[in-house]
Image (cartoon, grey):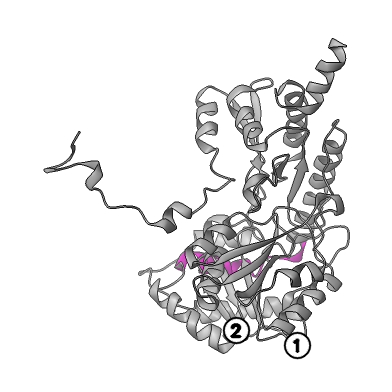
Amino acid sequence: MPKKFGFLHFNLKDMPKLSKKAQAMPASPIRKLMPYADKAREEGKNILHLNIGQPDIKTPEVVLERMKNIKRDVIEYSNSEGYLPYRKKLAKYYQAHGIPVMAEDIMITTGGSEALTFSMMTCFDVGDEIIIPEPYYANYSGFSVMAGVEVVPITSSIDDGFALPAAERFEALITPKTKGILICNPGNPTGYLYTQAEMKAIAVLVKKHDLFLIADEVYREFCYDGAEPFSAFNLEGIEENVILVDSVSKRYSMCGARIGAMITKNRDVQAMAMKFAQARLSPPTFGQIAAEAALETPQSYFDAVTKEYTERRDFLVDGLNKIPGVRCPKPKGAFYCVIELPIDDSDKFCQWLLESFELDGETVMLAPATGFYITKGKGKKEVRAAYVLKKDKLARALNIIEKALQEYPGTEIAEENVLTSRS
């Protein structure tokens, strides 16, 4: 049947084929269930969103006041690398945290996502390989597809809280095609915080095999129990190999500002990345204004946020571990946790929660962990939760999860109880 678009008529078989790259692009495990969530809302259910890292913490007042009082006659382009005054102030932020960075090392990007994309497109050719510990932030797969890079996963385990796998396991995966390692510290989705020893072990491999180390450090401000983050920029002997990726999204609860940074002392990397930056013209003007203002946020803001997230983490993780058959390591950083559930399939369970379950008119939205692994079959009994809601909502979420596990047809405990009752 011919399709009609305005005055044009043609058959679908005459449509041009979509690219293999587009077909290979993975759907977001964080957002792919949104149609089911939309339908659940239409049915009158209230949804507790633990599926996405959108903080409910208020953006710093200094940012909100700055945005309310912008007086400009023209909203102009910035430099492709970002406004120099902002980059100078940002360098001072890093220096205050013991990270030796200068303004010329910094390129402002449209979120951390663009920083990651620029890093891969600058450093790797199509077919090159990058090693990433899994489970990892799902969009790393998407960025890799865009750059034509092959992800080689190295699997961490819930048994040791998702600690970094041993250096020997990394080295066994290195081939002539291996050009880099990508880490997230503290980690999304696990909340694991790499130790200095673990970071130094990576540095040895990077130096030995002359690899790039892309370090996603966007959750640096979220470390708990007195733990301190150890930046890849503090690793000695690989200064030219390191690319640091950062973002204001979570640090200042400014996800919509879309301002990140790609930071490196490697001038060749900077020069080549600038070509991609020029092609997209410039990062957002309003976002940079907000981000520069955010650098004036008082330490008291971060102290209060850390205290709040620590309480939420303890409340959620301790509550989860009290549910029969549930296991959840306590994260040292970020605001995510990976939860092992006694279920058959996390994708089915998360969809079932939205489609078929409610408690007092409410349900929970979680992210299936299958999307955070590239190894097939991994994550089928795991989900990711973001503790970005207040404790009263987390309490309701815990109650919903416990009751849901009692009713879900694929719950292993439920099956055992059925067998027991029949015998």
Decide which of 260, 12 is in the foreground and name it.
12
Residue ID at (77%, 85%): 236
Decide which of 170, 83 is in the foreground and name it.
170
- Location of residue 344 by image quarter: top right
Q: Quadrant of the N terminus?
A: top left
Q: Secondary structure at mark 1?
A: loop
Residue ID at (59%, 68%): 293
Residue behind mark 2: 105
Q: Which of pointers 2 and 1 lies earlier in the amino acid sequence?
A: 2
Work out whether 36 lies above or below 50: above
Magenta stretch: give its range: 285-300
- Image spot of residue 178 (x, y percent): 63, 74
Q: Is residue 296 inside the magenta stretch?
A: yes
Residue flagged by tag 2: what amino acid is it? Asp
Work out whether 311 lies above or below 180: above
Which SS does the magenta portion mostly show? Answer: helix
Q: Is residue 308 inside the magenta stretch?
A: no
Q: Is residue 99 visible?
A: no
Residue ID at (88%, 58%): 225
Classed neighbour count for the residue bearing mark 1: other residues with Cα under 10 Å, few (<14), some (14–19), many (≥20): few
Decide which of 87, 122 is in the foreground and name it.
122
Give the numbered dot on residue 237: 1
Decide which of 307, 180 is in the foreground and name it.
180
Q: Is residue 272 visible?
A: yes
Q: Nearer the viewer, mark 2 or mark 1?
A: 1
Work out whether 259 lies above or below 327: below
Residue flagged by tag 1: what amino acid is it? Gly
